Amino acid sequence: MGNAAIALAALKAGVNVACGYPGTPSSEIIETLSARNPGGVYVEWSDNEKVALELAAGASFSGARSIVTMKLVGLNVAADALMSLPYLGVTGGLVLVVADDPGPISSQTEQDTRQFAAFAKVPCLDPATPEEAYQMTLAAFELSERHGTPVLVRPTTRICHSSIALDPAFDYQPHPVAGFERGSRWVVFPRRAYQGHLEILERLPQVMSEFAASPFNAILNRPATGGAAAPAATPVGIAAGGISWAYLLDALALQDAEQQAALPELRLLKVGTPFPFPDQLAADFLTGLGEVLVFEELEPWIENELTRVAGACHLPAIIQGKLTGHTTLAGENTVTAIRDQLLGFFSSSQPAAASTPAAATSAQPTVNLPARPPILCAGCPHRASYYAIKRAMRGKPGVYCADIGCYTLGNAMPLDMVDTCVCMGAGFTVPQGMARVQPDKVHFGLMGDSTFFASGLTGAANAVYNQTRVILCVLDNRITAMTGAQPHPGTGIRMSSDATPADAANALDAAAILRAMGVRQVQEVNPFELQATIEAIREAVRFVSEGEPQGPSAIVFKAPCITVSKPQPAPEVDQGKCTRCKLCIKAIGCPAIVVHKGDVVIDQQQCYGCHLCEQICPQNAIGVPS
């Protein structure tokens, strides 16, 4: 079937990683990839669509080619990752196959993925036949790598489940994996997001230009069939996309002789790349036309885009379709329905006024403000956790995938301990994709306790289920710190309760949950006990690196945020012992440790008394005065 054709195209493209979540009409893609796997492809059913997309993103960050499959409503689950990924870009081709379900036949909505593509600003390909689904999947990998962006392929139910004779013979050649290269581009801080948005806006016109010349789009001219007896008239345009294009060609071919004789000269537009819309091709199509009828399933995407182009180019063509009541408003199109709508249009067309959306404007910043990057607070336990990992991994190749929260700030120097940050939950899932294509490295997943309960459970379950060798780190500071110290399930405090951390018996325990989920090695540490924490990390590295596959290891770094803890006595620097090596500053970057008149001193107003610096100083020059 069409789904098998998509799977075969992915194999021909050398796909390295394939993952998805089962949902009709998309399920058979992963099943075919598993059945036809030549042995070099990592294939998994992920435990939800968000996990699947983030895992594939991790593999693509590392240079692998990845394919992710889901149905239309599954994209809602994966939307968080989809919206962030175009801002970061990809290295290896990342193709997201989202099967839409007009009807709907087996879904709870009729949402249109073409609109999601425009919302996320990712190119979208819309196959008209199963054979074209095969060709578009191949093209999508190339397009993704050429422009460094995820690419959507949007087959619909009749494409996915149509049967075709397609079994191309080829030897699977895995796409070469270059490996992950560290850099600030992978961490979606506000400044990176701003730059990424500019990159998207630069990329889309380039893709649009390519789409204008793409073989997946076409203008066909069909002369009037009435011969010399047919009166001269302005050509009529008909546009269609997806399976509706195939239906249109069948409907035109099935007209009887009398109906054929009544047809005027027709100009046909096939739209196989709905976003970014091929504006120049559309303008060429509309030039000289009086009326245009549009056939498409679900939303009036092509109809709206043609109306926009006509207005922008001051072309008088009147665009008709769903919005004017000329074509099917909801559900599937059929050959019979399109034939009947064509006859009705040609016999009694009633032009509708076209509308042109207002031009969008965007304000550009006019004031260059000084950069004030956020930093971890003095006394933050995340600083101690990152430093311990850095010490334990000294001399070993590691990749550190963080999540959204205070701990994302660990990317800054001197810690430099965050390689990726996509969206909530991705801290546990992105490293799983990386681990599948770079097993020679140690992959850490890092997220906070609040995020663990919000989005981390599915990623942890996925690692256990698929026996993935990653180290899952819960940086438990007992609160949702970055957004204002709100409670979460790990605190036991609810918005509607007067409970406190001391008597909240319903607090969930991250370590216990991880054990219950099947993580075989779970350790709890206080990150401010530096040496013990380093040893725990080394033990976790041994667990995931040696012996038979045992799945993930987990470490819960447990120490409270300064917003929920009392400050301890602040240490001081013994200037007689201090050699001014500044290791305490260079190693952890605590804002409470400063240089004043050439001496290294501790700002007593900022220090929270975590005593991490005492354990770092090689001269034992830092301590609390007796």
Image (tube, rainbow, N blue to C red):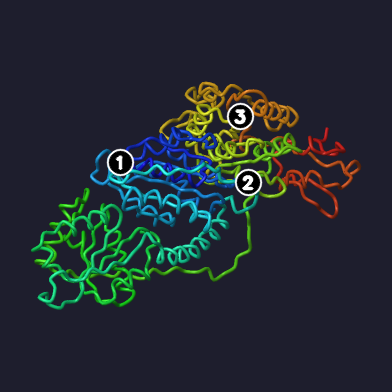
User: Which residue is the site of mark 3?
Assistant: 556
x, y percentage for residue 394? 75, 38
x, y percentage for residue 271? 33, 60
Give the alpha-carbon distance from disc 2 to disc 3, as whole Å.
26 Å
Instruction: Name the residue furthest right.
Output: 576
x, y percentage for residue 297? 26, 53
Q: Which mark is residue 161?
A: 1
User: Which residue is the site of mark 2?
Assistant: 180
x, y percentage for residue 617? 82, 39
Q: Depth check: 458 or 502 in front?
A: 458
Question: What amino acid is at disc 3?
Answer: Val
Q: Depth check: 259 or 143 in front?
A: 259
Question: What amino acid is at disc 1?
Answer: His
Q: Depth check: 104 or 388 in front?
A: 104
Give the class, few, some or many, for how many residues have Cα within 10 Å of label 2's Cα (few <14, many ≥20).
Answer: some
Task: Give the total number of marks visible in the rendering.
Answer: 3
Q: Is residue 359 above or below residue 195?
A: below
> Marks 2 and 1: which is nearer the front?
1
Q: Residue drawn 59% across and 28% down? A: 552
Question: What amino acid is at disc 2?
Answer: Phe
Q: Residue drawn 55% across and 22% down? A: 515
